[in-house]
Image (spheres, rainbow, N blue to C red):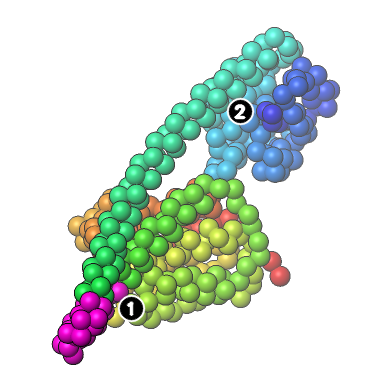
Amino acid sequence: MREILIVDDVPENLQVLQLILKQPNHRVRAATNATLALKLAKEHSPHLIITDINMPEVSGIELCKQLKADKGLCDIPVIFVSAMTDTDNLVEAFDVGGVDYITKPFKPAEIMARVRTQFSLLDMKSLQLSQALSERIRQMVMGIAHEINTPLGTSITAISHLNDMVATTKGQYQAQRLSANDIETLFSGADDCIELTERNLKRVKYCVEALKSISVADTQSVKEAVNLQDVLDGVQVKIKQIKSNVPYELTMSLPDEMVLIDKEKLELALYHLFINSLTHSGVPEISINIVAYCAQNQLHIEFSDNGKGLQGLSVEQLLTPFVTTKRGNSGHMGLGAPITSSIITSGLKGSLSVTSSNRGLQWAFSIPCSATS
């Protein structure tokens, strides 16, 4: 089903357009002004907007500017409706992002042809995005599969070695040739095998979490009222399962009010930021500072650590999958930062910046939200 939003301050024009566009696979919504049009666009995400250029108060050109300035609406194609003599306004309409125009009086065949053209372009773009996404997923899955195979192979080898040691000790016991030194050797070897297996299985767990994060980043957001302190408490529980042997000091400044946001995506983004700081800080005493506040329907978060910053990497490389200076270290494979960036920008429709210095790394990001009582 194709969603089409038509905008005109003259009800008769809307009625004519609705009659022309009425098709089994079209859902047409109408707005008599730009304010209502923006509201409907945000609520229904139409595939196409057709708007009159000349409207009182807010013109179609200004409406297009507002659409293109909105991250969630900027990709919607806009077709303008104009009089045949309105050439000056048409030039400006294309300058602000319009893709086509329809002239008055309306010609049904012309309107349907231009609408079909835009839908064909949308289908082509969707196919290209789908192919690009499939390739990205394929590369991600192959990379994660490689990262999982190594610690799994190590764990299997360690367990096999432990099994051999137990079998040898059991044989010595049955033959009544078991000495205290043999038992000590078994215990020492068992400790090593258990530690190696536990460390590598934690790495596997991190890989699984990364795979889950990749899938969650592109899912539709489900917003709920959350307390940021509760979110961070949940994140720290997960951190202890992966980095229980890495102590850190945490300071926070959080808003008192509840915020309406996708809790799962925010938790995953913060989780990966913690993991990166604990893995890459490079200092003996790790400190993490989080400052969050709400302003103008945005949740602003600053996440910083006291590490050595990006050493040998640019910010662009940091956000590139599988680029890491610590390949082979338990629980790290160069996906934390790219996943975080994807969750914030794609999953949460936010914006971010990353800065680095010899005093550490700082992530600053803003996410659309609303405070709630």
- Prevailing SS of the magenta stretch: helix
Q: Residue at (64%, 72%) from the top-left corner? A: 257
**Are discs 1 and 2 less than 8 Å apart at CB?**
no
Q: Specify the quadrant of the image occupied by residue 88.
A: top right
What amino acid does circle 2 point to?
Val
Residue 189: image location, x then y, percent: 21, 77
Q: Residue at (29%, 80%) from the top-left corner? A: 285
**Image side of residue 37 versus residue 161, left or right:** right
Residue underneath mark 2: 78
The answer to whether residue 361 is seen in the rendering is no
Calculate the distance from the C-alpha at mark 1 to the C-alpha at mark 2. Answer: 55 Å
Residue 297: image location, x then y, percent: 61, 59
Residue underneath mark 1: 245
Residue 304: image location, x then y, percent: 38, 69
Q: Nearer the viewer, residue 270 or 136?
A: 136
Q: Is 15 a magenta residue?
A: no
Q: Residue at (46%, 74%) from the top-left corner? A: 236
| Furthest-front residue in this view | 175
